[in-house]
Amino acid sequence: MNRKIISLVVFISLFCLTSFVLAQVEIPNPLGEGTDFPTLLTNIATGVGTLIGYIGVIMIIVAGILYLTSAGSPERIGTAKKALVYAVIGIVIGIAANAIVEVIKNVLGVGT
């Protein structure tokens, strides 16, 4: 019981100190240069596309490891092939993320 009370007091005191720490943090403008919604969509698409590309490369490596450790098992080779196909599809979508957003902006007529 005593340990719970001490933990609660420590937690509350640390929680109260966060206002001093957060007061010194300056949050940058997420839009970058622009201040409009299409610019925000483009920035988000760029970030998400980059992240998907990185994850796709990691998944290609994982698929290679799965293939190498399959020991001739047809089921495990099939799993490795599926992982490779999905990783390549993910990389293509990641590369096309900006193009997809631009097409949507042109269709809606909100792009510059």
Image (cartoon, rainbow, N blue to C red):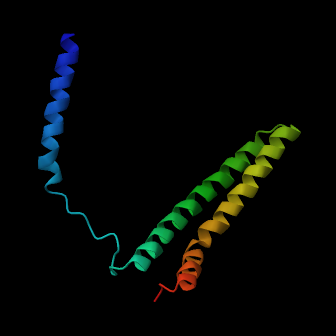
- Number of marks: 0
Q: Quadrant of residue 33?
A: bottom left
Residue lying furthest bottom: 112
Front in this rendered view, residue 12 or 85: 12
Q: Residue at x 32, y 79 (%)?
A: 35
- The image quarter containing residue 12 is top left
x, y (%) of residue 8?
Answer: 19, 24
Left or right: where does residue 74 sit relative to residue 39? right
Image coordinates for residue 15, horizontal then vertical, percent:
18, 37
Task: Report the quarter where the C terminus lies.
Answer: bottom left
Res 72 visible: no
At x 76%, y 39%, the residue is 69
Q: Residue at x 77, y 50 (%)?
A: 82
Residue 73 image-quadrant placement: top right
- Name the image quarter holding the N terminus: top left
Q: Nearer the viewer, residue 6 or 80?
A: 6
